[in-house]
Image (cartoon, grey):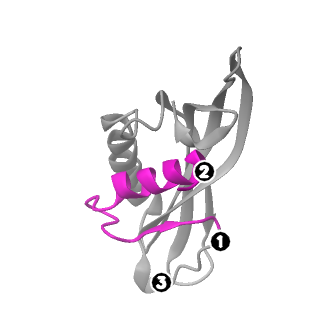
């Protein structure tokens, strides 16, 4: 089995695969090389995590808040923000459809976005980073099982 963090990334990728605009072009990892013919696409990665003691006793629990980022890549000859906003609608609605990710998390909350664009060339290529906080709990002696 794997760390719950990896299981959450995998579950988010599964949840976001098959969306209307990005289809199966969903990649795990921050530094996935995306070719132009794979756009629009999504990249999913975890940026950081906070943890605190959640349960005191012989089997201590750890409450965690994992920062999950979904990067949406798109290019357009017109207004690339329109394509990215369409992707954002699809991603945000998909992420809110199962806030437990099949029992891995206690809750998921959208926390904001940021946008970068490069207008060099015939088409503007842009990336929209959608940020989510995923709350989950593990036992300190078993970080491969969500509790």
Of the numbered discs in the image, which one, if any, rests on residue 36? 3
Residue topped by disc 2: 3
Identify the element where label 2 is drawn.
Answer: loop
Q: Front-most of 103 and 87?
A: 103
Could you say which quadrant of the image residue 49 lies in?
top right
Q: Which mark is residue 31?
A: 1
**Bounds of the magenta segment:** 1-30
- Which comes sooner in the sequence, label 1 or label 2? 2
- 3 over 38 or under it: above or below: above
- Mark 3 or 2 closer to N-term? 2
Residue found at the very far top of the displayed protein: 56
Q: Nearer the viewer, residue 4 or 25?
A: 4
Dot 1 alpha-carbon crowd within 10 angstroms: few under 14, some 14 to 19, many 20 or more: few
From the image, state whether disc 3 or disc 1 is nearer to you. Answer: 1
The percent position of residue 6, horizontal first and vertical second, equals 56, 54
Distance from label 3 to label 1 (Cα)?
Answer: 15 Å
Q: Position of residue 100 (x, y in %)?
A: 40, 33
Q: Position of residue 70 (x, y in %)?
A: 52, 53
Residue, x 70% and y 14% (percent of image)?
A: 57
User: How many other residues sit within 10 Å of disc 2, few (<14), some (14-19) or many (≥20)?
Assistant: few
- What is the secondary structure assignment of the residue under circle 1? loop
Q: Which residue extends farthest front?
A: 58
Q: Quadrant of residue 117?
A: bottom right
Does residue 9 show up magenta in the picture?
Answer: yes
């Amino acid at each position: 089995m794997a760390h719950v963090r990896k299981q959450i990334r995998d579950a988010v990728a599964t949840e976001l695969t098959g969306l209307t605009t990005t289809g199966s072009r969903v990649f795990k990892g921050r530094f996935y090389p995306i070719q132009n013919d794979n756009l629009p696409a999504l990249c999913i990665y975890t940026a950081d995590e906070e943890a605190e003691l959640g349960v005191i006793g012989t089997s201590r629990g750890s409450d965690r808040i994992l920062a999950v980022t979904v990067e949406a890549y798109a290019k357009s000859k017109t207004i690339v923000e329109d394509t990215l906003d369409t992707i954002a609608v699809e991603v945000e609605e998909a992420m809110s459809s199962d806030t437990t990710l099949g029992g891995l998390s206690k809750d998921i909350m959208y926390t904001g976005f940021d946008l970068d664009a490069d207008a060099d060339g015939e088409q503007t290529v842009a990336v929209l980073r959608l940020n989510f906080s995923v709350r989950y709990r593990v036992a300190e002696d078993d970080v491969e099982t969500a509790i």
